[in-house]
Structures are given as structure tokens and as C-alpha cells.
Image (cartoon, rainbow, N blue to C red):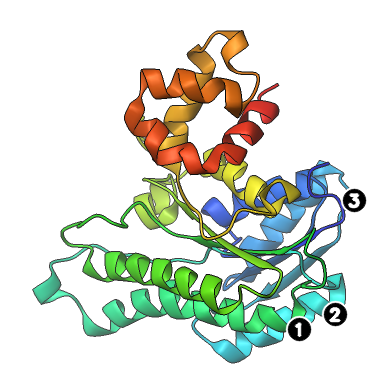
């Protein structure tokens, strides 16, 4: 199992991306800390993990990521119940569409608080409990970003501003903690079939083809939480780029998909743009190749 014995906390794990990641981690042997505002939702996630029969430990705690005291209490609880933390996924998010000049002030502030302050609170609360004593098994702090960075999306001013901000936060954390055994990385999805995008229609089977399923992102989080990513730091993993990589892998002759070293020449020939975008993350491509076999 890829994450056997590791302790991983996922915020926003009651539904959507966070739920999918938590279940995927448990399937790979990780003990899981589930955090969200709604107890019923994380209990549902817990029950789905238990149904896997993997025998992992599961700790459940409600908290609002905009409230530091609640988040700090939650991480102390996770440490007390699971031990030192190998990985944290700062995934909780919020968005809303609206003309900027008409946008409600409190709603704007809430979007900033959930997406930006939530990441800060999550790292600050997690830091004392991260397992930082082994350079060969670094602690992993992963942020769920968005392909909204570096775009300009009309009517999503607060959300785009927040997703720009967390890229800056990650860069600062990398520089500030470079002498500690912590890696900071980010997954930047395109449109995903979640409540944040599609409201109560999420998961009803009617999503457009261009909208991803939450579990389509699991490979990227599993990679970043695993020892394969021990030397990967400050990466921005755009799901759109690696979705294209997966397509090329599925079409390439078998002798071209033995490893990144073999595949990269094929990819560069077929799509110089995608190759340029992913060439610094060959370890992830290797991981995708191994996972597909």
C-alpha cells in the first residue's frame, strides 16, 4: 500500500474533492483525520472508509477553517488520536459568482477567509504536529488551488484573488521552512463536479463532459503524499496538463511508456506545449505510468 501507516488529515473532507482524497488515502493504507463543518457529512465519509475494510484508524472532528481556535483544537485532537502527522491536505474552499460592483461585502470576505485564511489556519494548527524528523520521509502540506490561477475569470473576483493568494502563501512557506523536512505543493484543478461548482446537481450523473469527477484528481494527491514526492517542493500541478499526459500515455506504443525517460521524447514530439508544462514533474509522470500498470 502506497501510504501504509501514514497519518493524513484532509480538510473539507465531507464531500467533493476532499472526500474523494480521504477515501483514496485510506484505500492506500493511511490513517485519516476528517475535518469539515458538517458532522453528518464527515460521518458519511468515515462510513465509506470503514466499508473498504482496510482497517485504518479514522478520527473525525468538525471545525470551521475560518476559526483558528476550532482548527487548532481539531489538530490537537488528530495528533492525540493518530500521532504525528505525515501529510495535510488544505482543501476546504468556497466560491460564488457575481458582478464585482454588486458583490455582497460579507460574502466576498467569507470567500477570502475560507480559501486564504483557511490555509493559514490549517498550516499554523498542523505545524506543531507534523513529523519533521526524517529528511527521507518528509511531511507533506498540500493545498487545493485552482486553474483560476493565473487566469482572469469575470464575476469571480473573490475566488480568483484567493487562489492567486495561496500560490503566494506556498512560495513563502517553501522559503521560510526550507531547512525543515516539509514539502509544500499544490493541485490546481479545472472544473470539478462538486457542490461549489454545480450546487445540489453535483454527483447526479448529468455533468458536462468537460467537468471532472472529484476522484479524477486522486492520483495527484496520492503522489504528493507518498515517498515518491520526497524531493518535490513548490510544485503547481495543473490537472488539465496531466489529463492530457494521461491521454498521450493511453495512445502511445507500449515501448514508449516504460518510464518518463522513455516517454518524454514521445510527448515532446506530439505536444511540445504539454511537454514544456510538465517536464519538471517527470516523477509524477513516472508515478502515473506505474499506477496504470
In the rendered structure, find residue 76 and report the number of the disc placed on it: 1
Above/below status of 210 relative to 15: above
Point out residue 185 in the picture as x, y percentages from the top left corner: 55, 59
In the rendered structure, find residue 27 and report the number of the disc placed on it: none
Residues packed near mark 1 inside 10 Å, few (<14), some (14 to 19) or many (20 plus) = some
**Marks 3 and 2, how far apart at CA:** 19 Å
Would you say the residues marked 2 and 1 are in contact, meaning their CB atoms lie under 8 Å apart? yes
Point out residue 140 in the picture as x, y percentages from the top left corner: 67, 62
Residue 164 shows up from this direction? yes
Q: Which callout, 1 or 3, points to the residue nearer the camera?
A: 1
Above/below status of 40 relative to 5: below
Task: Residue at 59%, 39% (x, y): give it.
Answer: 284
- Is 266 on the left or on the right of 40, as rendered? left
Which structural element holds mark 3? loop
Look at the image and tell me in which quarter the N terminus lies: top right
Q: Earlier in the sequence, mark 3 or mark 2?
A: 3
**Marks 1 and 3, how far apart at CA:** 23 Å
Task: Residue at 53%, 42% (x, y): give it.
Answer: 281
In the rendered structure, find residue 80 and report the number of the disc placed on it: 2
- Is 211 on the left or on the right of 152, as rendered? right
Above/below status of 151 relative to 172: above
Point out residue 293 in the picture as x, y percentages from the top left corner: 70, 21
Task: Residue at 62%, 86% (x, y): give it.
Answer: 70
**Along the viewing direction, whichever of 12 and 38 lies nearer the viewer:** 12
Residue 206 shows up from this direction? no
Would you say the residues marked 3 and 2 are in contact, meaning their CB atoms lie under 8 Å apart? no
Which structural element holds mark 1? helix
From the image, tell me which residue sits under label 3.
55
Amino acid at each position: 500500500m502506497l501510504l501504509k501507516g501514514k497519518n493524513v488529515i484532509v480538510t473539507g473532507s465531507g464531500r467533493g474533492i476532499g472526500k474523494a482524497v480521504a477515501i483514496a488515502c485510506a484505500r492506500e493504507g493511511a490513517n485519516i483525520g476528517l475535518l469539515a463543518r458538517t458532522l453528518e457529512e464527515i460521518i458519511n465519509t468515515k462510513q465509506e472508509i470503514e466499508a473498504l475494510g482496510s482497517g485504518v484508524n479514522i478520527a473525525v472532528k468538525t471545525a470551521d477553517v475560518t476559526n483558528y481556535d476550532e482548527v487548532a483544537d481539531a489538530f490537537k485532537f488528530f495528533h492525540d488520536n493518530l500521532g504525528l502527522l505525515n501529510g495535510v491536505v488544505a482543501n476546504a474552499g468556497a466560491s460564488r459568482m457575481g458582478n464585482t460592483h454588486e458583490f455582497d461585502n460579507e460574502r466576498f470576505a467569507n470567500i477570502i477567509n475560507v480559501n486564504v485564511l483557511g490555509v493559514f489556519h490549517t498550516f499554523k494548527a498542523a505545524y506543531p504536529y507534523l513529523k519533521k524528523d526524517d529528511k527521507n520521509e518528509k511531511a507533506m502540506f498540500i493545498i487545493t488551488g485552482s486553474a483560476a490561477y493565473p487566469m482572469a475569470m469575470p464575476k469571480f473576483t473573490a475566488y480568483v484573488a484567493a487562489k492567486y493568494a495561496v500560490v503566494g502563501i506556498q512560495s513563502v512557506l517553501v522559503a521560510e521552512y526550507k531547512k525543515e523536512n516539509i514539502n509544500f505543493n499544490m493541485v490546481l484543478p479545472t472544473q470539478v463536479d462538486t457542490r461549489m461548482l454545480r450546487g445540489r446537481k453535483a454527483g447526479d450523473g448529468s455533468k458536462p463532459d468537460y467537468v471532472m469527477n472529484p476522484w479524477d484528481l486522486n492520483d495527484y494527491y496520492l503522489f504528493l503524499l507518498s515517498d515518491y514526492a520526497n524531493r518535490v517542493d513548490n510544485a503547481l500541478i495543473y490537472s488539465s496538463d496531466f489529463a492530457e499526459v494521461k491521454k498521450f500515455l493511453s495512445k502511445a506504443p507500449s515501448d514508449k511508456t516504460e518510464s518518463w525517460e522513455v516517454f518524454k521524447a514521445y510527448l515532446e514530439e506530439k505536444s511540445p506545449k504539454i511537454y514544456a508544462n510538465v517536464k519538471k514533474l517527470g516523477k509524477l509522470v513516472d508515478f502515473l505510468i506505474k499506477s496504470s500498470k
